[in-house]
Image (spheres, rainbow, N blue to C red):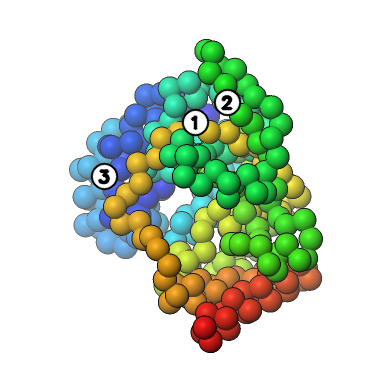
Amino acid sequence: MILITYVPFYRLHEIEDYFIKNIEIIKPEYSMVYIDNIYSEKQINIVKKVINRDIEIVFGNWRSRGGTWLKILNDMHNYGKDIVVIDSDNVLDARYPKIHGILKKYDIYTLLDYEGSQHNITGWLRRSKYVGDINIDGEKYPIYMYRIKPRNTLELLLGKGSPFFIGPKQLVYISKPLDLEVLEKVEKAFNNIEYSIRNNISDEAVLGVVLYLCNYEEIPWTIATHHYRHKDHATGYMKTSKIITAIAHIQFSNGLIKEFKRNYFRLYELKYLVSLFKNIIY
């Protein structure tokens, strides 16, 4: 197994703060960090001074979480091993190795953080179904299946957030590489978005599109990380952000239409055209 995390350059400190702890919990064969927003040799020298451990570093300037994820998924074709990708500001439950021992029967599974389950569990359950519990050292961990896409056109157009979504994503386990042609086409569609607004589309949404195109319908998940949310996280209602996000989704869906010729993506585009006009007018 390969343990991976990914950070923009300005959150480099989270490797020492959190990722090292996850290495100690999992004890993977290899550990890797993908670092975004690297465009200078001086930055690389700084990184090497900060990360002076046995961790492989991949440098890039993908300029977004979604772009970084697409790089990870493409690179998986060269690794020949299953991967665990954890968000850089999370620390795993100490029982995670035993949880993984049970859940690894699935091609893919994800984890939600305890903090997220306390503050926003309803949002996750809206597209999930409960399928049972697993018992680890006397503690119960509920297992849910998250539906990647809406049930019907009405839900797609009127539902909250991106219609394609992987579900909770503090950790993602992937047992085998995903379809390379799908990844290449999604990357072309994603690059159709102006680079300055690509981060307005969540990596959960990008992964949801990829998995939908790889014929996944539901993704199992449970709750088993602690999330130490970084202080740069924006909160609250921001109309300008909603307008920019709608534009990013329109550009992404337009790219998907060109690459895959699926009517479902036309509905995706329509959803955000409506959102754009609504937020401009009101």
Q: Earlier in the sequence, mark 2 or mark 1?
A: 2
- Mark 3: amino acid: His
Label 2 and label 1: CA atoms lie apart by 8 Å
Label 3 and label 2: CA atoms lie apart by 31 Å
How far across and how far down the image is residue 1, in percent? 53, 29
- Mark 2: amino acid: Tyr
Q: Earlier in the sequence, mark 3 or mark 2?
A: 3
In terms of depth relative to the viewer, which is nearer, 19 or 144? 144
What residue did someone put label 2 on?
141
| Residues tagged 3 and 2 counted as in contact (Cβ below 8 A) | no
Residue 56 versus residue 63 in the image, above or below: above
Disc 3 versus disc 2: nearer the observer:
2
What residue did someone put label 1 on?
224
The residue tagged with tag 2: helix, strand or loop?
strand
- Mark 1: amino acid: Ala
- Crowdedness near tag 3: few (<14), some (14–19) or many (≥20) residues, C-alpha within 10 Å: some
Q: Earlier in the sequence, mark 3 or mark 1?
A: 3
Picture residue at 41% right of the left edge, 35% below the top: 226
| Residues tagged 2 and 1 counted as in contact (Cβ below 8 A) | yes
Locate residue 271: give its quadrant. bottom right
Residue 99 versus residue 219 in the image, above or below: above
- Crowdedness near tag 2: few (<14), some (14–19) or many (≥20) residues, C-alpha within 10 Å: some
Locate residue 181: give its quadrant. bottom right
How far across and how far down the image is residue 39, in percent? 32, 62
Specify whether 21 is left or right of 186: left
What residue did someone put label 3 on?
13
The residue tagged with tag 1: helix, strand or loop?
strand
Picture residue at 62% right of the left edge, 21% below the top: 134
Residue 86 can be seen in this image = no
The residue tagged with tag 3: helix, strand or loop?
loop
Specify whether 11 is left or right of 150: left
